[in-house]
Amino acid sequence: MILTPALNRIGSTSVVDCVCEYNGRQGCSVTGGRNFLFQRCRFRHTGRAVLHSAPGAGVDIEAENWPIRNVTFETCEFSDNFGFGLVSGSGDSADIGCNRCKFVGTSNWAAWPDSPAMRFSHCVFAGPINHCHGDANPARAAHFMDCTFTDDRSLSPTGKLFLGKGKEEWIAIVLKSPNVRFDRCKFHLTGDTLLPLSDNGVIYADCEMSQRSPTASGPLGTYIGTNSITGQADLVGAIIRGRVVVNGRVLSRTP
């Protein structure tokens, strides 16, 4: 499926209860235009059939001849694709929202949200995310609200999850991404996966984090509101503006 209406159109396109499975190259490509709404759609198993080619994503938002604006996914699933579950970051693409969606990365990143003004609300990510778009303008940075990040393999249709390409496995890599924000999000890790690898440009507000791995993680960031962390986590150098409880111990605020 390829969608390319003009950017300046007044109308909109709704795609409802669409199943895109076992496609060779892409479950769906949005290459230009605005005002797209996807509801209860499934983008699964791209690149898993006999014929396949890169990038093999569930959905690729890639502006070509026209910019892309106002794209919304509601109660959609991006699962078991050879490439990324959802990828955006090529061309003039912005203003993309995902509500109550499920992202499962079995052989690649669950999501690669690298376009301005991407918003995720009440979504579940099984497997890691990378390249979250950061911006000096907070309104243009990636924003996650009430989302869950997990390494729970029971959420995978194959029982497998992609958990990184190196020795260490982080549930999210958010570096050099100013103002990326996590509000009321839960990071619940029960395997060897580590809490996010991030820096102080990232904002954590009222989040809950836990990991079982004995390896120390480094979820640095600017902490506001009330946050809790259970497990081995090194927050030396983090900016504490609110309340952070690590394994029952309250950290002092940053002067």
Image (cartoon, rainbow, N blue to C red):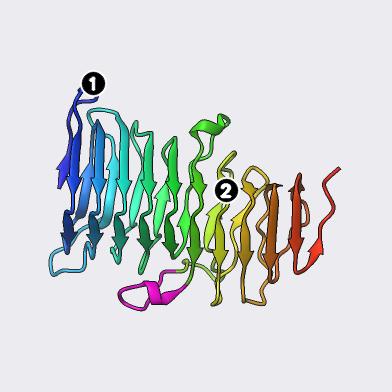
Question: Residue sitting at 38 percent across and 48 percent down?
Answer: 99
* Rendering coords of residue 234 (x, y %): 73, 62
Identify the magenta region.
Answer: 152-162
Question: Residue sitting at 37 percent across and 47 percent down?
Answer: 98
Q: In this view, does 205 lie above or below 251?
A: above
Question: Residue sitting at 49 percent across and 60 percent down?
Answer: 148
Q: Is residue 241 above or below residue 111?
A: above
- Which structural element holds mark 1? loop
Examine the image and state in which quarter residue 104 appears: bottom left
Per the model, the C-alpha gap separating discs 2 and 1 is 33 Å
Q: Which of marks 2 and 1 is nearer the N terminus?
A: 1
* Rendering coords of residue 156 (x, y %): 35, 72
Residue 160 in the magenta stretch? The answer is: yes
Magenta span: chief secondary structure: loop
Q: Is residue 174 above or below residue 44?
A: above
Residue 66 appears anywhere in the view? yes
Q: Give the residue number, with chain letter if any, for mark 2.
A: 183
Q: Give the residue number, with chain letter if any, for mark 1.
A: 8
The reply to whether the C-beta atoms of the residues labelled 2 and 1 are less than 8 Å apart is no
* Rendering coords of residue 27 (x, y %): 21, 54
Residue 14 in the magenta stretch? The answer is: no
